[in-house]
Image: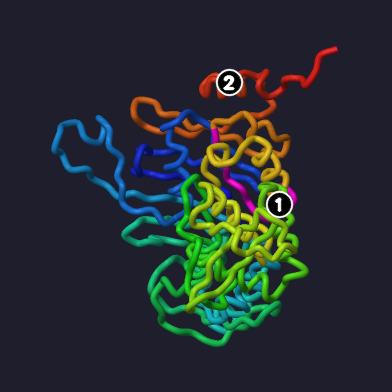
Amino acid sequence: MRFTKFSVTNFRSFRDCPTFDLTPGLNVLVGQNNAGKTALLDALTLKFGPEPHRSIRTVPTAGVPISGESRADFSFEIEPAELLRLLGESVRTFFVPVMTRAESSPEIQGAAAAAWLPTLRTVRARYSPGGPIVSAAVIDAPWGGDSDERSLRFEAEIDKPPRYVGVHNVDKRSHLPYALVGLFTQRVYLFRAERRAAGDCPMGGSDVLAGDAGNLPEVLNSLHSRFAAGRFAKYLEYVRAILPTIKYITIPSSGGSLKILLWNVDPRDDREDLAIPLSVSGTGIGQILALLYVVVTAQYPHVILIDEPNSFLHPGALRKLLEILLSHPQHQYIVSTHSPLVFNSPSVTTLLHVRLVDAESDVQAINLKKPNELKSVLADVGAHLSNIYSANSIL
């Protein structure tokens, strides 16, 4: 699953953001400090609260209450193979509205819907803090509208076509689009330059990282115990590539709790007393550990949002992180920055310029093949083309 279109309305610095496209691969948000990049990433999590826009247009006089709700409108795509597996693994039973050909029997409608389901590609939805999912619909679906009416019930098994089983009256939130949106929002992770409270947590066996990464010790312990010679080894390889001072990671247990220890010495020395708890390590290390866990272990494509990685990684580490991310192209990456190092990457698929104009944030897509558009973005953040294309030596 990945975002294809997004817009946000009446949220922080965004009064009415135009809809913009997001592509597979590396999407970069660039702009000055306080332009709205972080607000946009928070909106993309689809977990934000009601923070209505405040400017002279919405509050013309002091004390006037702000009207309207904060909301995000978005579309996302899902691949057919991923859809069938998700239906069997996570949804199992789902409903779709009766089809528009009302004269057809439920059995005929069920057969037609079952035949069409493998072609399902795009879901459009609206999020609002009070909803939170106000509406959800499958694009080009052959069935009827989004309402609490008679619905076709389906059951699914892993890697098998869904099977029609009957007609039921259900709330519209039991319909398939809402189930898919719910799964999609669980696949969006945000990483930013702040110290995560993820150094310790209660023991458990989950391998799914929580949205706030609060159970990072738990999932790393599960990864180590199940795949020590495989995925955990690959995970450590990536950690060392970005943070070479970390030689090893252990997750000891004590009193029903787990904690993460970072080894700056060779683990063969058996000097656990010299290992450093993650909870007292540098800002950003927890973010990298959590981010790499998602990249290495995610069974399905995820959306990975990264806020200003240049603020918690030195240039060499940032360059290595981008290299690792791009070696896992199944995920969609949306990175905010004002560093030319990030949008210098030839793998950038979409460059979005975020600006604050008259106290309102705006998003504009930049054509990477037009030097004048790129120069305007660089000028906005106080950089030059030479910062991107400068030579290491001149002969």
State the extent of the magenta-drawn residues as a range.
326-337
- Numbered mark located on residue 240 in the image: 1
Image side of residue 175 versus residue 81, left or right? left
Which residue is under mark 2? 383
Image side of residue 267 versus residue 132, left or right? right
Q: Is residue 104 above or below residue 166?
A: above
Residue that appears at 49% across and 32% down: 354
Residue that appears at 47% across and 38% down: 37
**Position in image of residue 187 (x %, y %):** 55, 61
Mark before the other along the chain sequence, 1 or 2: 1
Q: CA distance from mark 1 to mark 2?
A: 31 Å
What is the crowding at mark 2: few (fewer than 14 residues within 10 Å), some, or many (at least 20)? Answer: some
The answer to whether any part of residue 180 appears in the image is: no
- Residue 265 sits in which quadrant? bottom right
Q: Amino acid at mark 1?
A: Arg
Q: Of 105 and 174, which appears nearest the observer?
A: 174
189 is within the stretch colored magenta: no
Residue that appears at 29% across and 44% down: 52
Q: Amino acid at mark 2?
A: Ala
The answer to whether any part of residue 76 appears in the image is: yes
Element type at mark 1: helix
